[in-house]
Amino acid sequence: MNNASGAKLSVRTKLLFGCGQGVESGISFAANTFLLYYLTNVCKIPASTAGTLIFLSLLIDAIADPAIGSMSDRWRSRWGRRLPFMVAGLPMLVIGAIGLFEAPNASGFALMAYILGFSLLVRLGTSLFAMPYSAMTAELTSDYNERSSIAVYRCLFGFLGSVAIIGPSFGVIFARPEAMSLPGAYRDLGWVMAGAAILFGGACIAGLFSGSRASQSQPGASHQSPLGDLRDMLRNRSFLVLFVGSVVCASGAGSLNAINLYAYRFFWHLSPSQMQVMQLAIQVGFVAGIPVAALALQRFEKHKTLMVGLSVLALFQGLSPLLVLMLPTAAPQLVTVTLGCTSFVFGGCLSLIFVAFQSMVADAVDEHQLMFGARCEGLYYSALVFAGKAAIGIGSMVAGLLLTMIGLDRPDQLAQMPVGSPAVTWLGLIWGPGHALMFAATVPVLLAYTLDRQRHAQVRRKLAQIAPAASAA
């Protein structure tokens, strides 16, 4: 699968590869959107406790990610380094998705242990599939621009994976408001998650097998222990900037996802059908942003384009609820249009952020090879996902604590509060300006990133000069 020449890849190759992104995107969307609400409203777990459970599952999973990535860098099999992990992970996340939203009629420690166990099964199964899969981005090609193109295809299937969850959940399962409190509805959601994972993951794995692409992935050149590779990775400034930036950005995303349903229902006063429209607006914006991201990253530096996207995202996220609060008598149409525009822009910026981060990590892998003489694609991508998952877990825990602090420990408490009450107002301010500040905080971090187009070209030239000598030796 390694394309050292940096030649352009066929559309078929990109489609086969991109299909796998639907697994992680669909499962993550469902878990991040519905799990906190399910635990508080159906399982009757206090928000702070539920947020802590989500944090623990993500933290344990995040700690396992670098080990999974490093193992896939060193794995030897007839199917290459990455594919065996993907095959092992898919059934785990399918079983976990079904069991997670099938909580028994229990309480206390037994219920929390059940939730934590199946949440871990979902997260670890997703990691076993997604970590090796993401590492292939750096193996497919060494071309600076082609890597952005690969990430664009991943974006497309990420959109399809999310829509595969949004359509049935908001359009059918939770079409009636009361369904959001029914255990059976969440049971159906678990089966939808499992079906989406089988569809996208199975297609990706089958495509890799039929094309024999996995067997082309050559073993890594690492000459030391995983801890040695980890130490060297932490000495790479480009990686450290990306790591810190992803932690800050993902913390905001995790917290925002966790309280979205609260804000939709009790601040924006949306029906389930309107919630579906807003989620679809995000996905439409995501798709619309893909060609914009592809064009921008071809013409401009990746980190600067990423900074612009984050700034626009923060601006719209912060202003939309303020507009509603300043116009308490605003017509429902204005509220809907305001949130719809924000959702669309949010999706467009997300596609840019995804493409830029994925492409920049692949470039950092090349720099690592030049600095330390080893390729550690799996370790690099798993470390980036580790940062994202740990941050999303922190964000979910913070969201639960914030809801408790403003007196909204359970959704049924919100339902009894009048429009304009302090708690509802605080909910809107946390959802909007609070998360806008978190996204904006990523921008100054990226100012320290120096691996631009010119620097990457120098890295590739030096690696090309080293390769013949290494082959001769």
Image (cartoon, rainbow, N blue to C red):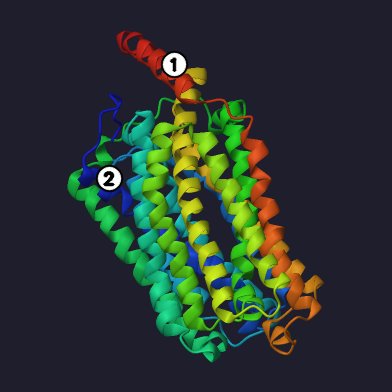
Cα–Cα gap, marks 2 and 1: 26 Å
Seen from the viewer's position, the closer of residues 441 and 191 is 441
Seen from the viewer's position, the closer of residues 460 and 90 is 460
> Label 2, on which residue?
14
Look at label 1 and name its amino acid: Gln
- Where does residue 379 sit, x and y in percent of width and height? 50, 37
- Mark identifier at residue 458: 1
- Where does residue 309 sit, x and y in percent of width and height? 54, 46
Sequence order check: which comes first, mark 2 or mark 1? 2
- Where does residue 335 sit, x and y in percent of width and height? 59, 74
The N terminus: image quadrant: top left
Is 381 drawn above or below residue 407 in the view shown? Answer: above
Is 134 drawn above or below residue 34 in the view shown? Answer: above
Residue 304 sits in quarter: top right
SS of the residue under disc 2: helix
Q: How many marks?
A: 2
Tell me which residue sits at (31%, 11%) in the image.
468
SS of the residue under disc 1: helix
